[in-house]
Amino acid sequence: MDIEQNEGLKREISTIDVAANVVNNVVGGGIFLIPAVIAASLGSASILAYLLCGLILFTVMLCFAEASSRITCSGGAYAYVESAFGPYAGFLTNFFFMFGFGLLSDAAVANGMVDMLSIPFPIFAHTFYRGLFFLFVFGWYTYINVRGVKHGMRMVRLITLVKLTPLFLLICVGFFSASSGNLKWETWPSVNSLGEASLILFFAFIGGEAALNLSGEMKNPRRNAPVGLLIGIGFVVLFYIAIQLVAQGVLGADLKNHEAAPLAAVANVLIGPLGVTILIGAAIVSIFGNLGTSPLVYPRLIFAGAKDGLLPKILSKIHPKFATPYLAIIVYEILSFVVSTAGGFKQLAILSSASMLLIYLGVVLSTFKFRFTNNSVIQGTFKMPFGLTIPTIALIIIIWFLSHLKSDEAIGMAIFAGVLTVIYFMRYVVKKKKTK
């Protein structure tokens, strides 16, 4: 794979677009639930988990930033791993990202959104109407994104603004109503409890790196990709910390008793019933926004894989008018619709979370490979300071996280990887026979 090439796509995405995409990918339905979950584990010391996860996330994202500055074609993590370790590793990364994380994550949050809608509108509890809703959502986003990356980015900016506004208001109002006494803790949490809570919280932070799948459509990708990524991640970390502090400061020890809708409970204290309605609406818009970003970023994995011969070549076709990988977008959204109608939130979320850890591992190892095999730095590229210290820290943390996976998650990952391996080598054998 060429690390930089003319793929026939329009380079129209700016640094701010990348950052907005990162924020929109990460800030989803989870932030409306996670404060109570962490408070239940750590109590008033919950902020420690956020600080730890912020540190962890930056070590991993710095590896992504360096790789994205070196390799500026479409595909994100897939492109980095494929360039470092070859087509087999790229094939696994592509499918773990596209199916293990992207597709299953979209289906999971789509089900979560419909579950919330079924509270005020019980009709969505019926399978038929759930299916119609999924058809509308995925069909609408297919139309928007096939028409062009500009249209997709306008939708990302709009939804990012709409969903962040009520959360900003909650932070501003809550800042003056929070009690400092609710933020004090008497004892430090145990290493085990801090680790378990941080592992759960870390899953709420993942997804921002998917914005790098659009490197082939970025202006000056060597700068915009790493800078936009780090700006977006930095904003998310500070934003999450502020939300947790406000929720803890307003509700105190009672926060852990509102796992279904902790921020709605905060809004109820600060504003009243209207605040509850606003926050529930914001949660639905937030998830809707995540679903809107996915057809902008994940089909580029299909496009990149097809262009490199890992997937049917037809999926690399570009629309003659809109200059978008339209067949990849359509196929991805059809698969999202099918998977969404086939499962619920919990079943779909398990494989999704574990898959991203393996993708992070591949990108961090790619950083080592690039450093050892090519010490020369192209002018204008981003390079992490302190040598290999940061990727080493990231590697240790990821392995530690993977060691905490439940047995069924580990088995699921092994089976998925095994099936993909069989598919890859069967495809290799068939392709070899055709060339004879």
Image (cartoon, rainbow, N blue to C red):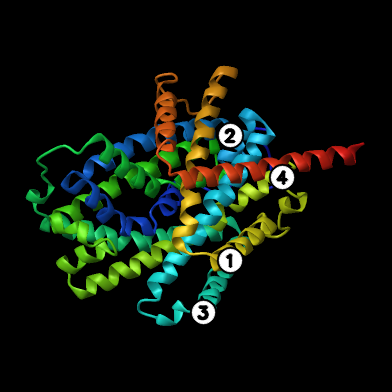
Q: Which residue is mark 3?
A: 129
Q: Nearer the viewer, mark 4 or mark 3?
A: 4
252 or 422: nearer the eye? 422
Q: Which residue is mark 4?
A: 423
User: Dot 3, how many residues are within 10 Å of its Cα: few (below 14), some (14-19), or many (20+)?
Assistant: few
User: Dot 4, how many residues are within 10 Å of its Cα: few (below 14), some (14-19), or many (20+)?
Assistant: few
Mark 1 and mark 3 in contact? Answer it, CB < 8 Å. no
Mark 2 and mark 4 in contact? Answer it, CB < 8 Å. no
Q: Which mark is residue 337?
A: 1
Tell me which corner region of the image, top left, top right, bottom left or bottom right, holds residue 261: bottom left
Whole-number angstrom distance, CA of label 2 to CA of label 3:
41 Å
Q: Residue 356's x, y, as percent?
A: 49, 43
Identify the residue at the far front of this view: 407
Q: Is residue 378 visible in the rendered structure shown here? A: no
Q: Residue at x 41, y 51 (%)?
A: 26
Pointer 1 or 3: first along the chain: 3
Pointer 4 or 3: first along the chain: 3
Q: Is residue 191 visible in the rendered structure shown here? A: yes
Q: What SS does tag 3 mark?
A: helix
Tell me which corner region of the image, top left, top right, bottom left or bottom right, holds residue 327: bottom right
Quarter of the image with the C terminus in it: top right
Whole-number angstrom distance, CA of label 4 to CA of label 3:
35 Å
Whole-number angstrom distance, CA of label 1 to CA of label 2:
29 Å
Whole-number angstrom distance, CA of label 2 to CA of label 4:
22 Å
Q: Which residue is mark 2?
A: 80
183 or 237: nearer the eye? 183
Pointer 2 or 3: first along the chain: 2
Pointer 2 or 4: first along the chain: 2
Q: Residue at x 43, y 18 (%)?
A: 387
* Type of amino acid at the residue the image marks with label 4: Ile
Q: Nearer the viewer, mark 2 or mark 4?
A: 4
Q: Which mark is residue 385?
A: none
